[in-house]
Amino acid sequence: MTPARAILYGTLTVGVLDILDAIVFFGLRGVAPIRIFQGIAAGLLGRASFGGGAATALLGAFLHFFIAFAVVLVYYLASTRVALLRRLPWICGPVYGGFVYLVMYLLVLPLSAALPPKYSFLHVANNLFAHFFFVGLPSALFARAAGVARVRMDRTARYS
């Protein structure tokens, strides 16, 4: 798999799995999907996001997938420098997902215009699970797929 394809597929996988987790988790608590996307847009717009209808929901969807792209890209770039990240994706991926969770909840959200989240044990447990297995692990597996292809191409070029 080429690096560009791995980053694209990784972005789509992380973005879809993460947002499906949010839709199911919050949907079971009565929150409509449009409100989840508007909540993401609230990072830029604050409370006004919830009055913006489909336009702010689309902005939230764009932002969500942009963040997924950044997360996958960072792991891929790091994996080109640190081979361990490619060799042990089942360990390094979830660890990376936990790191992403900490950055999002301790740095990004407090600096955004979004309302502070209401934490509960279930909310934090769900978020950690999702970040370990729906964010970090796919990022690592797609980086590994791109790295394996890159090594094969390098070996082929040396022997041709």
Image (tube, helix red, strand yellow):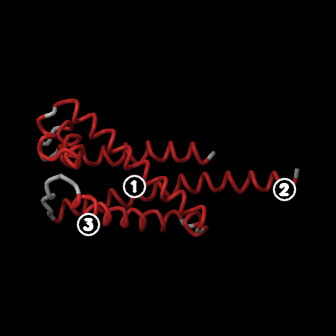
Mark with earlier residue (1, 3)? 3
Image quarter hosting the N terminus: top right
Looking at this view, name the residue that lies furthest to the top: 54
Q: Who is closer to the viewer here, 15 or 64?
A: 64
Q: Secondary structure at mark 2?
A: helix
Q: Residues within 10 Å of mark 3 (few under 14, many from 20)?
A: few
Which callout, 1 or 3, points to the residue nearer the camera?
3
**Distance in Å between CA atoms under marks 1 and 3:** 17 Å
Residue position for label 1: 135
Q: Is residue 14 left or right of residue 40?
A: right
Figure check: 66 above or below 140: above
The amino acid on which the numbered mark 3 sits, given as a three-letter code, is Leu
Residue at the image position 27 percent from the left and 40 percent from the top: 60
Q: Residue at horizontal 49%, vertical 59%?
A: 75
Q: Residue 106 bears which disc, if any?
A: 3
Residues under numbered marks 2 and 3 in contact, where contact means CB atoms less than 8 Å apart? no
Disc 2 or 3, which lies upstream in sequence?
3
Q: Position of residue 20 (x, y in %)?
A: 30, 43
* Residue farthest right in this picture: 160
Q: Amino acid at mark 2?
A: Arg
Q: Which residue is mark 2?
A: 158
> Could you tell me which residue is drawn at 39 percent across and 55 percent down?
135
